[in-house]
Image (cartoon, coloured by chain):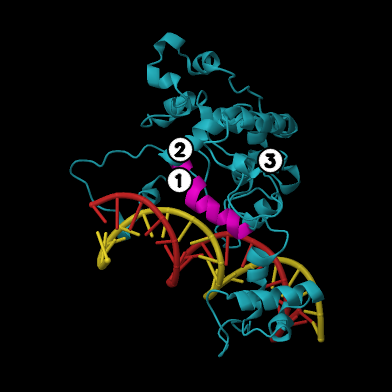
Chain colours: A cyan, B yellow, C red
Amino acid sequence: MGRQPCCDKVGLKKGPWTAEEDQKLISFLLSNGQCCWRAVPKLAGLLRCEKSCRLRWTNYLRPDLKRGLLFEAEEKTILDLHAQLGNRWSRIASHLPGRTDNEIKNHWNTRIKKKLKKMGIDPLTHKPLPAVPPPPQHEQHLSPAGESPEAQLPALPEQRHPGGKNTVAMAEKPDEESLLLRKSPAFCTNEVPMLHPDEIMVPPCDPPAPPQTCTAASTPTTSYSTVSTTSSSASTSCDEDTLLPILEWPDDVDNMCLIAGLGVNDMIPEMQSSLLWDYFLPPPPPPLAVYEDHLLNNAYVQYQRSGAFDQEAWNKLELL
DNA sequence: AACCGGCTCAACCGCGAACCT
DNA sequence: AAGGTTCGCGGTTGAGCCGGT
């Protein structure tokens, strides 16, 4: 359909915005409100396309935006929502007041994704990464076109939305199979529940804690526990909705050991440190069936099921 | 001091949906 | 109904920053 590329017009400026341009846009939008974006650049006296103006406003200039690092609770909310929604950044952002989809997308791609990979979790599916089999000795061919290791993993279920957008498959109208999965308490390691939008329960994200809680070092685990207590009470209804068993996050090392089938005495000193999280994550993955059993005990699955979240361990991943 | 590589994030691009004529 | 316009979304890019050598 004869659509004009909006930014190809001659004479329109591209690239970083200057303070002067910002000021023009802000003062225009504050005095006139957001109406037809098409008219905004002209009326505001800007040599920008409407798209550029809208983006600058929504992602940067809007007065209700929070700036700076995401709070821990926000990060957890993003994790929760991404597990349910996939890369629907605008939907995720709608649950985080003052945050933009762009900001969340960037944060996901630069931080959370890495952390999950370090934990052996596929950031796309929130499932454990499959074992990468050692290349056969006589067949160490590169995959075609130099695909990344990720591209060489076993094919996942169809991830693309029928519309062609590269989003994680989501059951807009849950089919029989997905309904069964959601009703089965045994699921979890195989499937991340893809929920219908109106089923999504988001733990309240009330970070307006003092900004200093933003740094990992200054945040004792207990401070997050408060948040996760709140969220787990909220996630109770979530679990009711999805009919998942509610498992408690262990209060202490004894419980962690219990879950992992270990005695406290079995633990080496390092394990008794706050790196427990790491220890309960799967080492090089065994065959999938065994692996799944093992995962029933691992911390991330506990997190997926209960919403409880070991913030300290999570923060440590940042430092690795 | 200079160079290099990795990282971050603001901005851009292209597409589809919704709306309008 | 068909074609055009506007808006919003998600993926990608690249300039600038920063730490390491």
Place of residue A106 in the rendered image (x, y in percent of width and height, measured from the top left): 54, 56
Secondary element type, mark 2:
helix
Which class describes the residues within 10 Å of circle 1: few (<14), some (14-19), or many (20+)?
Answer: some
Q: Are marks 2 and 3 in contact (CB under 8 Å)?
A: no
- Whichever of labels 2 and 1 marks the residue nearer the N terminus, that label is 1
On whether disc 2 and disc 3 are found on a single subunit, the reply is: yes
| Residue A33 seen | no
Taking the spot 51% from the left edge, 23% from the top edge, the residue there is: A297
Residue where numbered disc 2 is placed: A317
Which class describes the residues within 10 Å of circle 2: few (<14), some (14-19), or many (20+)?
Answer: some
User: Is A31 colored magenta in this rendering?
Assistant: no
Place of residue B15 in the rendered image (x, y in percent of width and height, measured from the top left): 58, 71
Residue A267: quadrant of the picture: top left
Q: Is residue A65 above or below residue A83?
A: below
Magenta span dominant secondary structure = helix
Residue where numbered disc 3 is placed: A209
Q: Amino acid at mark 3?
A: Ala
On whether disc 2 and disc 1 are found on a single subunit, the reply is: yes
How far apart marks 2 and 1 lie (CA) works out to 9 Å
- Whichever of labels 3 and 1 marks the residue nearer the N terminus, that label is 1
